[in-house]
Amino acid sequence: MSSSSCAIFFFFASTFLYTSSYSFNITEILDQYDDFSTFNALLSQTKLASTINHRKTITVLAFSNEAISTFSGQSNTVIKDILSLHIILDYYDIEKLENMNKMSLILPTLFESSGDAKGKQGFLNATLTRNGDIVFGSAVPGSILNSKVEESVASQPFNVSVLHISNAIMIDVGAHAPTGSSSPVSSPPRPRPAQSPHDSGDHENADSANGVSKLNSRFDLAFALVMSSFLWFMTVL
Ligand SMILES: *[C@@H]1O[C@H](CO)[C@@H](O)[C@H](O)[C@H]1NC(C)=O
Ligand SMILES: *[C@@H]1O[C@H](CO)[C@@H](O)[C@H](O)[C@H]1NC(C)=O
Ligand SMILES: *[C@@H]1O[C@H](CO)[C@@H](O)[C@H](O)[C@H]1NC(C)=O
């Protein structure tokens, strides 16, 4: 191969390998903050982390380990429902929220797309208060908006934004949620998923996800090879 076709090959190979990988990994973003270790572990446990990573534009409202006690004794289903209410299906960083042209917005969340939400349960109300705070609450009429945005944790415009909120946003997802039943997931200081020997389910899932992305990369590499040899062939002609 001449050096120019070599360069073309590497250009294509890297382009295809790059586009085949995810643009962000929420687990890795949150992993940099000890305060969100429980929130992060719950995202992996409920498999929501993978759902988030597959989205191109998303906002995650993260709450710290102290704010997680509300989840004590809840089933995995309830935790998943509540957490998916904290995942907004669009990109909102602090700047965008501060400059909303109304005083409040109703935003659809991942809980809405799960199909389990009733009425306005799958939506959040984001309100800019008179003193300039941004507060979130359920969009269910009569809900209190007491989850204040504390700071931006991470932002990659306009794909992923992670905002630290003061409280978990709670709604009553009662129907399919027998409290304190089968799989209670409480015990606050949970180990991080990577170090946890218990979460065998998650590891299986992570392994199969890796398998898929490995397959994709191999396919992309093969495609890049075909493309570059084709281009090389064209230049030779
Ligand atoms: C970021 O989001 C836009 C659409 O909002 C999408 O076109 C783009 O591919 C995303 N970037 C990455 C790296 O996924
Ligand atoms: C995201 O990062 C975690 C921790 O490094 C890893 O286990 C997982 O496989 C990654 N997910 C993707 C989709 O790359
Ligand atoms: C959001 O909630 C506040 C307080 O309950 C309410 O005044 C406002 O009308 C709600 N916003 C929308 C768009 O419904």
Image (cartoon, rainbow, N blue to C red):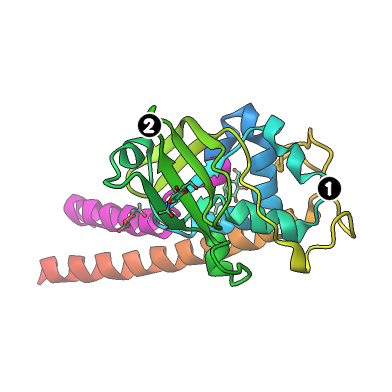
The answer to whether residue 106 is left or right of residue 235 is right
Magenta stretch, overall SS:
helix
Q: Amino acid at mark 1?
A: His
Q: Which comes sooner in the sequence, label 2 or label 1?
A: 2
Q: Residue furthest front?
A: 142
Q: CA distance from mark 2 to mark 1?
A: 47 Å
- Is disc 2 surrounded by few (<14), some (14 to 19) or many (20+) residues within 10 Å? few
Q: Position of residue 21 (x, y in %)?
A: 44, 55
* Camera-side mark, 2 or 1: 2
Q: Position of residue 82 (x, y in %)?
A: 65, 54
- Looking at the rendered structure, the secondary structure element under dot 2 is loop
- Residue 25 shown in magenta: yes
Q: Which residue is mark 2?
A: 130
Q: Residue at the spot x=64%, y=49% of the render?
A: 43
Element at badge 1?
Answer: loop
Task: Count residues near mark 1 (Cα–Cα under 10 Å), then give few for <14, some for 14-19, many for 20+.
Answer: few
**Which range of residues does the magenta coloring cover?**
1-28
- Residue 45 drawn at (x, y percent): 71, 52
Q: Is residue 15 above or below residue 175?
A: above
Check disc 1 and report the residue beneath it.
Answer: 198
In front of the other: 144 or 136: 144
Q: Is residue 47 left or right of residue 28?
A: right
- Residue under the image location 71 percent in, 53 percent down: 79
Residue at 65%, 63% (x, y): give it.
Answer: 208
Identify the mark at residue 114; answer none if there is no mark.
none
Report the amino acid beneath label 2. Arg
Using the rendered image of the protein, determine whether residue 95 is visible from the camera's viewpoint. Answer: yes
Q: Nearer the viewer, residue 162 or 28?
A: 162
Is-magenta flag for residue 149?
A: no
